[in-house]
Image (tube, rainbow, N blue to C red):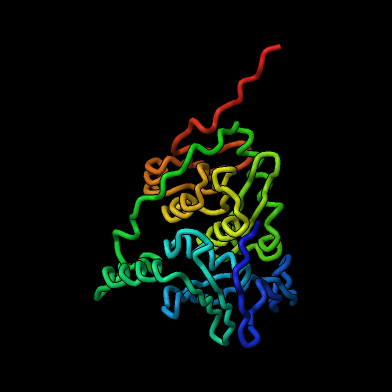
Amino acid sequence: MERVLSIALVHPPRLPLPALSVARTASLAGQLVPGARLVAEETAVAFTYNGTSHAVMMATPADLEDFAAGLSLTEGMVGTVDDISDLAIVGTDLGIELRMWICDTHMRSYTARRRISAGPTGCGLCGVESLSEASRPARRVGAGLRVAPETISTAMAALSPAQMLHRGTRAVHAAAFWQPRKGIVAIREDVGRHNALDKLVGALARRRIDGGSGIVLLTSRVSVEMVQKTAVLGASILVAVSAPTALAVRVAEACGMTLVAIARGQDFEIFSHPKRVAPIARKSS
């Protein structure tokens, strides 16, 4: 059963569309031709908890309930989506505010972390306030799936046709969840690759889908944060079209995750825990 947050839309909300048509002039065969193109929207999205400001992300204004739930989980603000009691989506002239209310226990823990990490300067790593927080170990993942090499290729082949927003704009990343015998059961798109994965985490958490039951697919490179967020989901296999960083490989190895990257067509490279990907033995007749 999907976790339905108690959501209030305030004033009424002035929420932009995920994409809009803009005028442009194209050069075609040496000729300048006026026309229009669909482009992805990007807007400021602020996260607040019990009235305390946490972060502002530049994001595609879509799937905001999933974004609120997913970032709360991957940032460690809550342990489960049920720890968020209410969400207000507030549209303003400056952007969108996601106002959440969480239990006092989690709020006290968050306030204590902010006091400890507060200082005269920040490390500048995507809003993380301390180096120790940026390099935190990823959560250990379970045994998860064991798949054949062709399963990886099949899952990735399903990703591009499912990218509806990217098809129109050619400007957004996607994060998707693929399950055996079902295919892609959830996909989220955003101008930010981290945002797309946060939205996917939130969508699966709200639908009570076990991360260990499938494979996370990414259209982007794999930085360490992408591994950490996937580990929060509990997925044991992460597949991406681009290469990983060295730190991402080390963290995936440490948390037990199979990291597959540079997955294009039938080809890919496995960087950690390769035993989950192996040809399926055929029974002799």
Q: Residue 107: image x %, image y %?
A: 39, 71
Residue at position x 65%, y 19% from top? 282
Residue toward you, 198 or 11: 11
The correct choice, above or below, for 100 with respect to 149 in the image is below
Question: On the rendered image, what quadrant is the C terminus found in?
Answer: top right
Q: Is residue 56 left or right of residue 28?
A: left
Q: How many marks?
A: 0
The quadrant in which residue 30 appears is bottom right
| Residue 172 point in image, percent of width and height | 60, 63
Kindly tell me whether residue 261 is visible in this rendering.
no
Q: Give the farthest residue toward the left.
A: 120
At x 52% / y 49%, what residue is drawn?
A: 242
Q: Residue at x 65, y 56 (%)?
A: 1
Is residue 252 visible in this depiction of the protein?
Answer: yes
Query: Residue farthest to the top?
Result: 285
Is residue 55 shown above or below 157? below
Q: Considering depth in this image, is 222 or 114 the residue closer to the camera?
A: 114
**Residue 186's image quarter?**
bottom right
Q: Residue 145: percent from the left, percent from the top?
A: 56, 37
Q: Answer with left or right where residue 154 lies relative to residue 125.
A: right
Q: Is residue 225 left or right of residue 154?
A: left
Taking 258 as reference, is 207 left or right? right
Give x and y (percent) for residue 4.
Answer: 63, 66
